Image (cartoon, grey):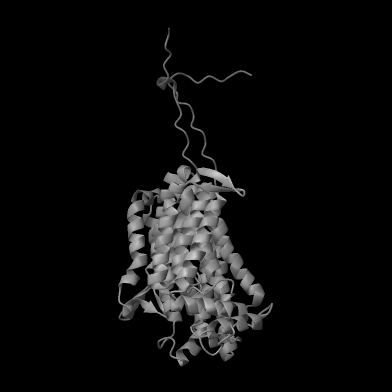
Amino acid sequence: MPMTSIPAGQAVPAPSEPYVPKRRNVEAVLLLFALVIGLFAYANVGQAATGKYPSNLATLGVEFGLALLAVHLVVRRFAPYADPVILPVAAMINGLGLVLIYRLDPYNEANNLVAKGGAASNQAIYTVLGLAVFAVIVIFLKDHRILQRYAYISALVGLFMIALPAVLPASISEVNGARSWIRLGGFSVQPAEFGKLLLVSFFAAYLHAKRDALALASRRVLGLYLPRGRDLGPILVCWAFAMLILIRETDLGVSLMFFGAFVIMLYMATERTSWLIFGLLLFVSGATAVANMSAHVMVRVDSWLHPFSDVTGRTRQLAQSLYAFANGGLFGTGLDRGYSYQIGFANNADFMLATVGEELGLLGLTALFIAYAIIVVRGLKTALLVRDPYGKMFAAGLASTFALQVFITAGGVMRVIPLTGLPMPFLAYGGSALMANWILVGLLIKISDAARRPLPPAIPLSDEMTQVVKA
């Protein structure tokens, strides 16, 4: 076949850029669907409570819709190739959480569990703030690899934020027996929610740099590759810090999140099952020892083992949540037709899930878990697609941390593991957790944009740039 020659001095045509669909219209449609789901649930609650639709249904619909439109336009402009599913699913769960908090407000106000005006209005403010922080990350974080430069600073700040409540007076930091808060006047924050994200960034950078050394094995025993003794240092340091958190703060959830995230990321970096087994054995043995020394932790373990031993006292909440799941059955009682408000603080942390199980039934609970799974799967897909090793570890770490929090929270309410007090992501009441989760989603959006963005075309060579050298 004859070859077409290019005249001297004429540049070689640049190859056309591969077409990658941005799918921003798909995201817009899914966001509209998320808005409709939230408004439909809100209308159902009002209909069940008063026999008519809430008077502010249209107003709230417009306000929430404008907020979602604003973040969608931000993503369309600054992260056009981002995953189109993560943001709508997170918005849908957030909207459902607002409706359930609103549904529980009358009973919590009657029992002085929340301030006048209810918790739903505060959660709506936290939602707007969370979306604003999400937009700031998408706009100003030009490249996620910038965070790799500050890995050790992230580690120091993250550890400081997790450990800070432990050194503060109990009057400022203790809530329901766990010292994981900072409360000043009417303002409260749980710094560990933000500290865990900084530590995930550090773990990603550290494991990327040390993965080859950590993957080495000295011997194989019973089908498991045992790590070398000198490579056990990092996991022992993280284990010791997790145990110090558990001893000082008596917060099983924070220590499990911190240590569990590191062990999972260590397994993903090295692909050694032995790290998972070592991590599980270390945490269980350490937590058992601490439980024997801490009355607060021991009460939670005893309630887990014997949930119906004191249904009017210390095991009341767990027993009532199990009754709520049983009462919900397959299809649920319907919104505002359940009795989960008897749990007490049902809008906080773990027990919001009991309201979902009772009023939406097993089908609604399954749909919620599928929504959480979608965020996790899309995060892991982003980790597979992104090109740089740090981005792979960071996205996988964020997705696994999110999955771990869902498991720990749901497992405590369903009596798979002891209660930890961690909030259900996007669903339970709490400003710190909600804003931290929106930051997590913002980071995944930026990494997914880098993962799906096509590479720039190669620079073509021209005849003028090529010289023939004669021998």
Q: Residue at x 46, y 91 (%)?
A: 111
Nearer the observer, 401 or 217: 217
Q: Residue furthest right?
A: 330
Nearer the observer, 423 or 90: 423
| Image height of 362 relative to 310, above or below | above
Give how far across and how far down residue 32 sits, in percent: 55, 67
- Residue 333 visible (yes or no): no
| Image height of 204 relative to 107, above or below | above
Q: Residue furthest bottom?
A: 110
Give how far across and how far down residue 376 sits, in percent: 55, 59
- Residue 34 visible (yes or no): yes
Q: Would you say 221 lies left or right of 113 here?
A: right
Give how far across and how far down residue 18 sits, in percent: 54, 40
Instruction: Quarter of the image for the C terminus: give it.
Output: top left
Q: Would you say 85 lies left or right of 157 here?
A: right
Instruction: Quarter of the image for the N terminus: give it.
Output: top right
Give how far across and how far down residue 89 sits, in percent: 55, 65
Q: Residue at x 38, y 60 (%)?
A: 136
